Amino acid sequence: MTINPRMLILAREAQGLTQQDLAKATGLAQSTLSKAENGLRPLPEADVPQVAKVLKVTPDLLTWQEEVYGFGSASFFHRKQQSLSQRTLRKIQARVNLLRMRLVRLSDGIAVDTSLTIPRIDIEDVETAAEAARRVRAAWRLPMGPVPNLVNIVEAAGGTVVLRDFETHRINAISVWHPGSGPLFVLNSELSPERQRFVLAHEIGHMVMHEGEPPRDTAEKEADSFAEELLMPAAEISKDLGGIDVRKAAALKPYWRVPMQSLIIRAEHLGIISTARSRSLHAYMNKAGYLTSEPAPLQREEPQVYKEMLRIHVEEHDYLVRELAQVIGMTEDDLADEISPPSRRGLRLVRG
C-alpha cells in the first residue's frame, strides 16, 4: 500500500490535528510522520491502520490520487466574514476536498436527471453582474417575483448543496467546481434559513462568472450584486421598497424570502434610500439584535442530492454500510450518521 503524502496531510488537517497531535495519538515519532508527509520515507505499512483510525478515514483513502484544491485556486471560492486562523481555514478546506472526492465516487454509476444547467457567463461579456443574474433567471425560466426554493433549483441544475458545521460563524460557504463533476456548494449550517439563501445565491454568482478565471479584486462585490439581482430583481422589487424601514422590511421578508438587512441594502443600492438612512436602519437592527437573529425566520431549504446518492447505494445498489464506507473512505459510524431517508421526489436520480 503506497500512501499519498498529500492525502495524509489532507486527512490530518481535516481533523484539525498538527503532526505533533497525530504523533501523540498514534504513538509514532513526529519525524516518521514528517518524512511520510514530505514523501521522503513511506509510512510503515504496519502503522497505516492505526493512523487511519485516528484520522477517521479508511486506509485506502490515504492512497487516493485526486487533485487537492486550495482557497487560492480559481476553482475554489469561499465567503469569509472575518479573518480566520490558517489552521481553521486548512481544516475547512480539507473537509470540503474530502467531501468533493467522496461525491465523485458516489456519482459513479448514478446518472443525475437534470432539467437545467448552471450557465457560465464571462463577466467581460456583460455590462454588469446584475445582467449575468438576469440571464441566469431567464435560463432557469424563473417566474417574476421571488425565487422559489433555491436549493431545489441548484440541485435540479446539476449542483450539489451540502450543509456542514464549520465550527465557526466566520465563514459562510465554500463552492468548488471540479472537472468531471458538477458544482459543489457547502454552506455553514449555522446560517439562518434566509441568510442561507443569499449566501447560496452569492456562491452561484462565483460559479457563473468567476469559475476557472484568475482571481479578481472585484469578485466578491460582483457576487453580491449577482445575488441581489437574482433574488430581488430591480424591475420587480423597486416598487415594494419605497419608504422602507425595519417594520416594512419584516413585512416584505416572508414574500421575497431574503434577510431584512438585504432588503434595506437593496433599497440603498437602487437609490431608493440614502446611505445615511441605510446606516441608521442598520444601527437600529444591530441594537435590536436583528443582525444576528432576525424575527420570523423562514423555513430552511434542505438539500437532497447527497442524501439521495447515499440512499440509492444502500437501498437500490444493495451496498452494506461497511461496503459503502470503504468506497468513500469513511468510518462506518460517520457514514451511518449521514444516511437518512429521502424527503423529496422532485429530483430523480437514475441508475447509470
Image (cartoon, rainbow, N blue to C red):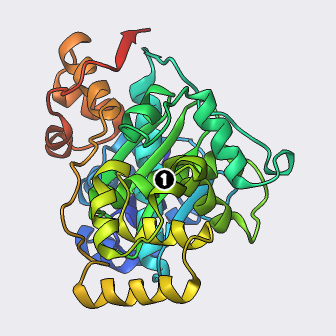
* Residue beneath the point at 46% across and 63% down: 241
Quadrant placement of the C terminus: top left
User: Residue 334: image x %, image y %?
Assistant: 19, 46
User: Residue 237: image x %, image y %?
Assistant: 50, 53
User: Residue 303: image x %, image y %?
Assistant: 31, 38
User: Does 255 appear above or below 247?
Assistant: above
Q: Is residue 56 left or right of residue 17?
A: left
Q: Secondary structure at mark 1?
A: helix
Residue 51, located in which quarter of the rendered image? bottom left
Q: For this rendering, which residue is in front, 248 or 309?
A: 248
* Residue beneath the point at 35% across and 71% down: 16
**Residue holding disc 1:** 7
Is there any visible trace of residue 44 in the rendered image? no
Quadrant placement of the N terminus: top left
Q: Is residue 331 left or right of residue 226?
A: left
Is there any visible trace of residue 74 in the rendered image? yes
Q: For this rendering, which residue is in front, 240 or 125?
A: 240
Q: Is residue 250 left or right of residue 278?
A: left
Residue 309, located in which quarter of the rendered image? top left
